[in-house]
Amino acid sequence: MPKDMPPSPRNDWTRDEAVQIFTQPFMDLLFQAQTVHRANFNPNRVQMSRLLSVKTGGCPEDCSYCSQSARNGAQLSASKLMQVEMVIAEARKAKAAGATRYCMGAAWREPKDRDMAAIEAMVQGVRALGMETCMTLGMLSENQVLRLKDAGLDYYNHNIDTSEAHYPNVITTRTFAERLDTLARVREAGIKVCSGGILGLGESDGDRIDMLLALATLPEHPESVPINMLIPMAGTPLADAPPVDPIDFVRVIALGRILMPRSHMRLSAGRTAMSDEMQALCFFAGANSLFMGDTLLTAANPEESRDRQLMDRLGLLPEGAACR
Ligand code: SF4
């Protein structure tokens, strides 16, 4: 191996190793994470994605953080699946604003076969604009995975949310193992995997480490790892959840960067509650992907102009943009 090639990603991390990395002094952790980041990525580039909710609310699942669950009291009215042409028109706008990947989410336990033709048309239409496509539709059967692959889907998002041990405290309508089954089907079909978690669900540091370890010990790491900070939603069981400590959040990003050195670590929901300085620390710890736009499904997201200002202040450029 040439001397300057970074080592291949490992998927045999032990819990002891992960705990040792996570609990080292903050400055040492940041230094290690930034060193790994620089060996694998341009540290001044950020991948930009845009997320659109193509079907909102009325979900039969009981994720305790989510305002789209019909079982929670968030009173979010359910919409129908969006028209394909409207989705393509929104994707065109996102492309013009600098997004390279278009993520489409539907509040379902799993797609119905009758919806698949429209879903496939959305993937094909967004791809025809020259953008990468990502979908998040819940659990998928083998046949649905193959249909999405044939339509040209690039990424499938399916978050594991938290550790296996904490999972039943957050969601009871499906299991952690079912989550991993869908991820395995997606990977087997050759679709890239986007999977991460949420901090602020009442989990311990150990649960945070275990959540990242579950991803880092998959046969192949997810290409994309979104790390969300809970936005407590009125009417949900986690409406009064205490805020996540910003330093703890940065530690999780750093551990994710070290365990999964070639994955894009994405700052996802919760950025409205993060200061610019906290986001800057996240980038230093190895975050290199953002959701742009002013809403994330049903949650607020920083306005694009604020993101641009922050990126300018930090000298960050979108991935794929020409150098200044
Ligand atoms: S997170 Fe997804 S699966 Fe869970 S209730 Fe919300 S929309 Fe449904």
Image (cartoon, helix red, strand yellow):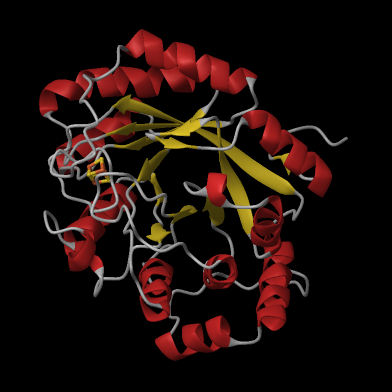
What residue is shown at x 62% (from left), y 42% (from top)?
47
Closer to the camera in the image, 148 or 288: 288
Q: Is residue 225 above or below residue 206?
A: above
Closer to the camera in the image, 138 or 141: 138
> Measured from the top left, where is residue 109 in percent x and y?
16, 41
> Measured from the top left, where is residue 320 in percent x and y?
70, 35
**Residue 1 seen:** no
What residue is shown at x 58% (from left), y 37% (from top)?
302
Q: How many marks?
A: 0
Q: Quadrant of residue 43?
A: bottom right
Q: Is residue 296 above or below residue 239?
A: above
Q: Is residue 104 above or below residue 162?
A: above
Q: Which quadrant, please, contains the C terminus?
A: top right
Q: Which quadrant, please, contains the N terminus?
A: bottom right
Q: Residue furthest top?
A: 85
Q: Quadrant of residue 60?
A: top left
**Which corner quadrant of the figure contains ligand 1?**
top left
Closer to the camera in the image, 3 or 242: 242
> Measured from the top left, where is residue 294 in percent x and y?
53, 30
**Residue 82 seen:** yes
Q: Quadrant of residue 130?
A: top right
> Measured from the top left, where is residue 318 in percent x and y?
70, 38
